């Protein structure tokens, strides 16, 4: 059975909760120590059965303290090469559970890694194109971060065009983030995209232009 292994630091709890706008409870464990303490648990998780792994993921993500939700995401990423389609779907479902940018962007890494391992953007990427939830759409917009020349510009265009009118900060930030990342590989493409999509918010444009020549 999985165990609750993280310590509690009362002096850190209130500041960490305040940083996340008091949406979550914290044990007060900082990221570096949490990752260090999680490392042996992650190694153990690679040796359990697929069914046991599901139990571990569910156990940690349902804990009331935010650090254990991070642990669940870390374990999913550590085991991403052996996740089943059902486990991938479970991970996707958690994007909207106790959702905020910290967990959403961490789940994105798990989901994107799985999709690229299975070369499944054409199939699994469709979920994000049709998603109503803003956090799932944020994942879709940023799904190709770091893919460089392997980025599918058609998919990126679709995700942005379907969300460009949404005033939500986290959506506009994601659009700018995705374009900025792709500009490192295809600056001319991004520069042209900005010209042909004048309705993009100032936030998205500013983020997207950060690495473009002349900006």
Image (tube, rainbow, N blue to C red):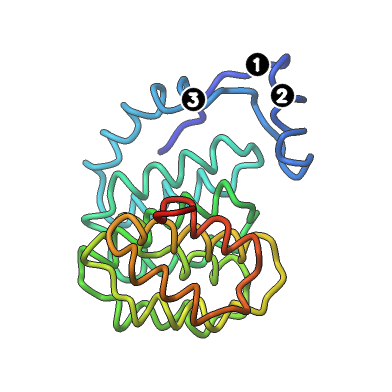
Q: Indicate the position of residue 77 as horizontal and vertical percent values.
A: 34, 48
32 to the left or right of 114: right
Label 3 vs label 2, nearer the camera: 2
**Residue depicted at 41% across the width and 83% down the height:** 126
Q: Which residue is mark 3?
A: 5
Q: Which mark is residue 13?
A: 2
**Residue depicted at 20% across the width and 63% down the height:** 117
**Residue depicted at 64% across the width and 37% down the height:** 65
Disc 3 to disc 1, how far (Cα)? 13 Å
Q: Indicate the position of residue 192 as horizontal and vertical percent values.
A: 41, 75
Residue 200 against residue 82 in the figure, above or below: below
Tag 1's secondary structure?
A: loop
Q: Indicate the position of residue 92 as horizontal and vertical percent values.
A: 46, 66
Tag 2's secondary structure?
A: helix
Tell me where residue 120 sits by quadrant: bottom left
Q: Indicate the position of residue 130 as horizontal and vertical percent values.
A: 52, 85
Residue 126 against residue 74 in the figure, above or below: below
Q: Nearer the viewer, residue 136 or 166?
A: 166
**Residue depicted at 46% across the width and 22% down the height:** 32
Residue furthest front in the image: 214
């Amino acid at each position: 059975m999985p165990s609750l292994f993280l310590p509690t630091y009362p002096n850190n709890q209130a500041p960490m909760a305040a940083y996340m706008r008091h949406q979550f409870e914290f044990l007060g464990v900082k990221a570096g120590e949490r990752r260090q303490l999680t490392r042996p648990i992650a190694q153990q998780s690679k040796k359990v059965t697929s069914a046991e792994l599901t139990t571990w993921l569910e156990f940690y993500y349902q804990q009331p303290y935010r650090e254990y939700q991070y642990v669940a995401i870390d374990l999913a990423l550590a085991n991403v090469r052996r996740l089943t389609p059902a486990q991938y779907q479970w991970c996707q479902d958690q994007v909207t559970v106790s959702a905020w940018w910290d967990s959403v962007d961490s789940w994105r890494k798990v989901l994107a890694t799985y999709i690229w391992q299975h070369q499944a953007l054409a199939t699994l990427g469709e979920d994000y194109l049709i998603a109503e939830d803003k956090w799932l759409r944020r994942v879709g917009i940023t799904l190709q971060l770091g893919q460089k020349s392997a980025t599918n510009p058609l998919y990126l265009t679709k995700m942005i065009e379907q969300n460009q009118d949404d005033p939500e900060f986290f959506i506009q930030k994601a659009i700018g983030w995705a374009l900025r990342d792709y500009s490192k590989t295809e600056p001319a493409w991004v520069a042209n995209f900005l010209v042909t999509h004048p309705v993009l918010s100032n936030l998205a444009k500013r983020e997207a232009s950060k690495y473009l020549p002349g900006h």
